[in-house]
Amino acid sequence: RGSAVTLFSLTDGLIVIVYAYNNARSRFAVGLGYYRGQGWVHVVCDERFPAQEADWTTFGRRAYDRMWEVRAKHAQ
């Protein structure tokens, strides 16, 4: 129950790296994206961990979806 790091991607325009550290009850996701010629990086922290989402894969998927929806804004 220590740390975990994983990569999550559904397309070549966005990769999300999820880091979970269970001992400190913290996790975050770093998105590396490319949209219309612009690269971008975005970080999402999960302040609700672990109360509402015990599964870090669910957190990773939500972070991915959130970043995918606003990728044009991140690329500016």
Image (spheres, rainbow, N blue to C red):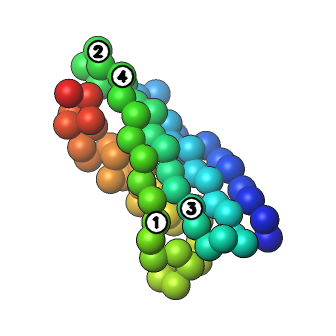
Q: Quadrant of residue 13?
A: top left
Q: CA distance from mark 1 to mark 3?
A: 6 Å
Mark 3 element type: strand
Dots 2, 1 in contact, CB < 8 A = no
Mark 4 element type: strand
In x, y percent, where is residue 72? 21, 33
Left or right, residue 19 beside residue 30: right
- Quadrant (top left/top right/bottom left/bottom right) for the N terminus: bottom right
At label 2, counting other C-alpha atoms closer than 10 Å, the crowd grade (few under 14, some 14-19, many 20 or more) is: few
Residue in view at x 32 percent, y 43 percent: 68
Q: Earlier in the sequence, mark 2 or mark 3?
A: 3
At label 1, counting other C-alpha atoms closer than 10 Å, the crowd grade (few under 14, some 14-19, many 20 or more) is: some
Q: Which disc number belongs to residue 37?
A: 2
Left or right, residue 8 beside residue 45: right
The answer to whether residue 30 is above or below residue 63 is: above
Residue in view at x 47 percent, y 82 percent: 52
Q: Quadrant of residue 39?
A: top left
Dots 4, 3 in contact, CB < 8 A = no
Look at mark 3 in the image and give the residue it sits on: 27
The answer to whether residue 20 is above or below residue 38 is: below
Q: Earlier in the sequence, mark 1 or mark 4?
A: 4
Q: CA distance from mark 1 to mark 4?
A: 24 Å
Q: Amino acid at mark 4?
A: Gly
On the question of residue 14 being in view, the answer is: no
* 76 vs 12, nearest the viewer: 76
Residue in view at x 65 percent, y 48 percent: 6
